[in-house]
Image: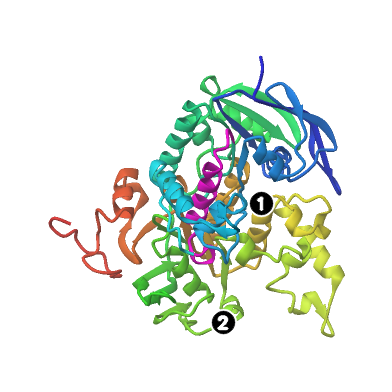
């Protein structure tokens, strides 16, 4: 059989690690082919080689049976290969439209012509249900909107081989369902799709075949229709994995965190992005804020964690007013934060792993002596966390964080925040981009923090995660809390109605007391 893309015997080494070890991948024309593996298994590296971002140390890439050289993304684009990266490749001070057409601009007499490009982009946006604001700057839009920009960027180039690296990580179920339909439609049009994901449900829903990598090695390729999720997860991690969150009934105690009347205004329009939000989190419970991306969750978290000052309202941790505390002050009161964007707010990418693990505690006595860092203590501490949280890196604590896989970067942040023994942990999309083995571990860590009589606020776009991990769900819509529900007493469909604003439990914005549903609401 002739494959549209065939990668034969691909090997790629980095300092201290073999990322790809003699891997073969074969893509048929018109198929959706999933690429599955743990964090650090070599999936993104393999796809980056296909897209020309890395050069293999050995091996051959063939397109339609003929060997090709792909030395840059430009070469890949000329061959009809496009890629949506897990960590977006966008220029933050350019608009959405400018990012989509970047590198394939239309000019006349040296002048940039945007009208035709705008028309084509908006046609694609409408056709594929990818709602965008073409004149918004990337720096000002949500992660979900950035994701749509990346997908449109690829569609605009009319690529025939489409690589999706964790494309649903920031989408809600309705958007994921739409994307799945888009992918099926693209495949039906004859486009060939390589789909990197950790989500077994998505593989079962959309993929024809699945290739599994583990530890940089090829494990096998299977037909998805005849392979169970349990079999796929065992191929991926090399052991049986529990796909259900194991936890006992919560026993909430005293209030640890309380927010009252929090309001955050848009810095551009002056409108309330977070509108009079009030809620509390008790010791021994996991409260989840659920909602469609872009409904004020990010801005609410920024206000809670000190990244932006609230325009109104009050916050307390253990009764202490932290409303005007800076970030270190909140840390000292027992708040920890696993941020939504690990690159922007979670890590210093040019620092090594050890330095990143002590970012919020390097000034403490155990890590310094006479005003100088005690390197032995820093590296010893890093070694302990690497072992405890199974953080995989080529050179251990000396690994430059930028070179680590996205999942292991995330595990480093989680290790740092949980090990500080916080009273109140805010976890925003903590399992984004993680494989099932890592998700199982992270969920158990969150439940363990809860069971230590701490308070956990989870912010998630993953409905499965919302329903299985939380003890109580607060739904946010257009900056207001519209429901406070028990996951045992609500269906996925009902939760979707709350998230879409079609149903609400509160008659007005974010009232802290439960109220009956109004007639005709």
User: Magenta span has 193?
Assistant: no
Where are the magenta residues, as a range? Answer: 137-161
Picture layout, residue 288 above or below residue 5: below
The reply, left or right, for residue 503 in relation to residue 291 is left
User: Magenta span has 156?
Assistant: yes
Q: In which quadrant of the rendered image does the N terminus lie?
A: top right
Q: Residue 359, position in %: x, y?
A: 70, 71
Residue of label 1: 406
**Main SS class of the magenta portion in the image:** helix
Q: Image point 73% across, 46% down: which residue? A: 53
Viewer-side label of 1, 2: 1
- Badge 2: residue crowd in 10 Å (few <14, some 14–19, many ≥20): some
Picture layout, residue 395 above or below residue 156: below
Picture layout, residue 49 above or below residue 33: below
Residue of label 2: 326
Q: Residue 181, position in %: x, y?
A: 42, 35
Inter-mark Cα distance, 1 to 2: 28 Å
Q: Image point 58% across, 81% down: which residue? A: 329
Q: Residue 313, position in %: x, y?
A: 38, 80
Q: In which quadrant of the rendered image does the C terminus lie?
A: bottom left
Q: 418 or 32, which lies in front?
A: 32
Q: Residue 140, position in %: x, y?
A: 49, 66
Q: Secondary structure at mark 1?
A: helix
The answer to whether any part of residue 430 appears in the image is no
To which quarter of the image does residue 90 belong?
A: bottom right
Q: Secondary structure at mark 2?
A: loop
Q: Earlier in the sequence, mark 1 or mark 2?
A: 2
Going by the picture, which residue comes out furthest to the left?
519
The reply, left or right, for residue 38 in relation to residue 299 is right
- Badge 1: residue crowd in 10 Å (few <14, some 14–19, many ≥20): many
């Amino acid at each position: 059989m002739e494959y549209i893309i065939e990668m034969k015997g691909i090997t790629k080494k980095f300092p201290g690690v073999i990322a790809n070890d003699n891997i073969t991948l074969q893509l048929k024309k018109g198929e959706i082919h999933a690429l599955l593996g743990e964090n650090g298994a070599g999936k993104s590296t393999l796809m980056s080689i296909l897209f020309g971002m890395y050069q293999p140390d050995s091996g051959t890439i063939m397109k339609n049976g003929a060997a090709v050289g792909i030395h840059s993304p430009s070469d890949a684009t000329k061959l009809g290969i496009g890629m949506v990266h897990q960590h977006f490749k966008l220029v933050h001070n350019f608009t959405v439209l400018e990012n989509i057409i970047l590198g394939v601009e239309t000019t006349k007499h040296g002048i940039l012509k945007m009208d035709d490009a705008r028309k084509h982009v908006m046609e694609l946006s409408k056709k594929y249900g990818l709602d965008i604001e073409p004149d918004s700057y990337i720096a000002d839009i949500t992660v979900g909107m950035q994701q749509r920009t990346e997908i449109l960027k690829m569609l605009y180039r009319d690529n025939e081989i489409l690589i999706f690296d964790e494309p649903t990580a920031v989408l809600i179920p309705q958007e994921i369902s739409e994307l799945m339909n888009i992918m099926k439609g693209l495949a039906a049009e004859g486009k060939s799709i390589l789909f990197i994901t950790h989500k077994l449900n998505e593989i079962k829903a959309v993929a024809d075949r699945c290739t599994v990598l583990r530890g940089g090695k090829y494990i096998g390729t299977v037909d998805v229709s005849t392979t169970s999720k349990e079999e796929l997860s065992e191929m991926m991690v090399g052991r049986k994995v529990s796909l259900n969150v194991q936890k006992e009934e919560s026993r909430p105690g005293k209030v640890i965190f309380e927010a009252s009347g929090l309001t955050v205004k848009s810095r551009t329009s002056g409108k309330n992005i977070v509108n009079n939000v009030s809620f509390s989190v008790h010791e021994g419970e996991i409260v989840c804020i659920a909602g469609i991306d872009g409904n004020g969750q990010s801005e609410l978290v920024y206000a809670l964690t000190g990244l932006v000052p609230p325009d109104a309202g009050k916050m307390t941790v253990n009764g202490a007013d932290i409303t005007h505390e800076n970030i270190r002050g909140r840390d000292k009161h027992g708040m920890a934060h696993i941020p939504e964007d690990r690159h922007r707010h979670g890590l210093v990418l040019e620092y090594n792993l050890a330095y990143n693990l002590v970012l919020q505690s390097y000034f403490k006595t155990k890590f310094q002596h006479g005003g100088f860092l005690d390197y032995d203590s820093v590296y010893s501490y890093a070694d302990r966390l690497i072992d405890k949280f199974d953080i995989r890196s080529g050179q251990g604590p000396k690994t430059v964080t930028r070179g680590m896989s996205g999942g292991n970067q995330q595990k480093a942040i989680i290790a740092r925040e949980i090990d500080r023994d916080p009273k109140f942990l805010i976890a925003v999309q903590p399992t984004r981009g993680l494989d099932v083995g890592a998700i199982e571990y992270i969920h158990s860590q969150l439940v363990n923090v809860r069971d230590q009589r701490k308070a956990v606020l989870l912010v998630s776009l993953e409905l499965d995660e919302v329903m299985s991990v939380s003890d109580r769900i607060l739904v946010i819509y257009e900056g207001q809390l519209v429901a406070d529900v028990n996951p045992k007493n609500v269906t996925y469909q009902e939760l979707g109605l709350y998230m879409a604003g079609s149903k609400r439990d509160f008659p007005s914005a974010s009232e802290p007391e439960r109220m009956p549903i109004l007639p005709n609401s």
